[in-house]
Image (cartoon, coloured by chain):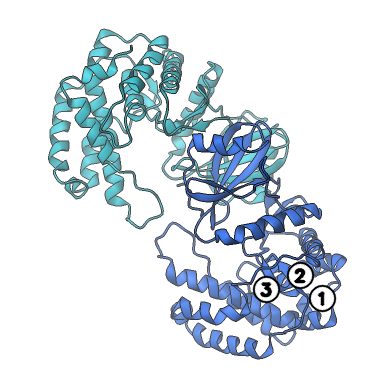
Chain colours: A cyan, B blue
Amino acid sequence: MAVYTHVEPDDLAALVGRYDIGTVLSCKGIAEGVENSNFLLETTAGRFILTLYEKRVSVADLPFFVDLLNHLADSGCPVPAMIRDRDGIAIQHISGRAACVIQFLSGISLTHPTPNQCEAAGAALGAMHRALEGYAGSRANTMGRPHWRGTADAAGNLDAVLPGLQAIVDDELAYLDRHWPTDLPAHVIHADLFPDNVLMLGDRVTGLIDFYFAATDFRAYDLVITHASWAFSSDGRDCDPALAQALMRGYAREVTLSDAETAALPILARGAALRFLLTRAHDWIHTPADALVTRKDPAPFLARLRRYSAADAADLFAAR
Amino acid sequence: MAVYTHVEPDDLAALVGRYDIGTVLSCKGIAEGVENSNFLLETTAGRFILTLYEKRVSVADLPFFVDLLNHLADSGCPVPAMIRDRDGIAIQHISGRAACVIQFLSGISLTHPTPNQCEAAGAALGAMHRALEGYAGSRANTMGRPHWRGTADAAGNLDAVLPGLQAIVDDELAYLDRHWPTDLPAHVIHADLFPDNVLMLGDRVTGLIDFYFAATDFRAYDLVITHASWAFSSDGRDCDPALAQALMRGYAREVTLSDAETAALPILARGAALRFLLTRAHDWIHTPADALVTRKDPAPFLARLRRYSAADAADLFAAR
């Protein structure tokens, strides 16, 4: 759940006045994104998202996000472009925060995607990767593999989350250190394309949103993050072959993975499962049980880690 | 900050399908109202608010609210009408909650109203009172004067909020018991028309919202609640005569108070100040300091109570 910074109506009118987007009709804080304060802003010219950046998004990274989203929007990807004011400025200040006015996209986030919807999501991810292949921008992935040991240490006693978890994580970190690939196609990736970050209407993807984890990493790692978040039962125990195959089929329509990438999918997926297991375990330990934010259960990502570690894990990535 | 009940896209599509309001384009949880889960629902036919009623609104009261809002909307008051489905049903069920689809109103809640805006708010309150004068509906005011002793007792040790507060409250309750008027014009009132429950565009009132405290009580008591929440500095120490006079002037355009009502305004205002002092003190004591919900400071309503208790308090209600 988002924390809201209050916006004074006069400040809002002044901000909107810098743009060619009419005058304010309505502005309501929305429960989207946990990193920022988001408002659904309606003007006489249409609807927009107003985002105020709270502490977890570095203001120094904002120019990267503005350029990335506008590059993707220009490439025909359904991402929310950052609107520029009359002076060409996208990054504004209001209520003591950096802020952007962002294109509004229709669509609903799914919780139980169908195979057709998984295929559409896979294709949208692939099309985005094609648009990013030659993209000059880059950003270090502070949530990438070299940082997982630090995340595990910062979490504290992992056995407090699940008995035996500390040893599992230590073993997995050592395994990934030895076997993580080093030379796969890389560019800026979304790195968090869970179903709640994809807007759909029926079987059509209308929006890829929440790029604030976007960073440079293997494109195949982006694919397995999407696989881990779209193709499993909510407890993480069962990978639904129909969902997984549809996702891979959609992606393959846009991107042909190299043999090295295909061979690396299981270990990359182990990494993806571990990354979300660790950040959820960290938040689990450091969020009071009675806080009003929902703590996300780490256990379903331990279940995925187990599934991706099985001898037949490569079968989960077949695009039939 | 509102607690959100999740709505499954399929359930939402089924709900919207009961109405003649097109198909779903978007649905976002909004941070409005602390009693309910509210969503800004966009369909091919327009925008609506979808409200899911959480535990603090009694489902048994919903037919009263539906009838009240539709009566006011039919009377030309800018309130959000409850939409009825093809079978004439306004109260639905989704995600285990009672729910209503409600008209969307443009406008922004003010934090620092001007005299012109206070006058418009006073006039909107008066026009609403005129529309309610002959209204047959009624609802017991569970936050009304007979219940304040119970609220004080349930709060616990009031001195933990502000040293000396317990004695002040005890004295005030005794005073109000002796002097509270008994025979003033009464009908259903809003009972919580703070600035955040009024939507405006410029100096025009576009919405009176959040009627979930509406109940039968003195209309002059509704007026002083509005006075207490619109005409004071945020610390409650200073009543701005320009704001107060504008509010009273706007109200007087629509409603002529009787002499008995005018004479009762100071004591009714003491009651209004005490009512919000008590509920805020209760929440202050019973909300953990580290909870993510913002606790509202009770002290500004103690300051108002003092101001309304002064010998010259009647001057605060002059409509010049």
Which circle's residue, 1 or 3, is located before the other in the chain?
A: 3
Chain at numbered mark 3: B
Quarter of the view holding residue A35: top left
Residue B318: which disc? 1
Which circle's residue, 3 or 2, is located before the other in the chain?
A: 3
Residue B46 x/y as whole percent: 68, 36
Which circle's residue, 1 or 2, is located before the other in the chain?
A: 2
SS type, badge 1: loop
Residue A198 x/y as whole percent: 47, 29
* Residue A118 located left or right of residue B307: left
**Would you name the residue on which mark 3 appears?**
B238
Inter-mark Cα distance, 1 to 3: 16 Å
Q: Quadrant location of the C terminus of chain B?
A: bottom right
Q: Against B2, is A148 above or below?
A: above
* Residue B180 located left or right of residue A318: right
**Would you name the residue on which mark 2 appears?**
B244
Q: Against B111, is A306 above or below?
A: above
The amino acid type found where label 1 is placed reads Ala
Q: Residue at 75%, 84% (x, y): give it.
A: B312
* Residue A151 located left or right of residue A17: left
Q: Against B15, is A221 above or below?
A: above
Inter-mark Cα distance, 3 to 2: 11 Å
SS type, badge 3: loop
The reply to whether callout 1 and callout 2 are in contact (CB within 8 Å) is: yes
Q: Residue at 18%, 26% (x, y): give it.
A: A309
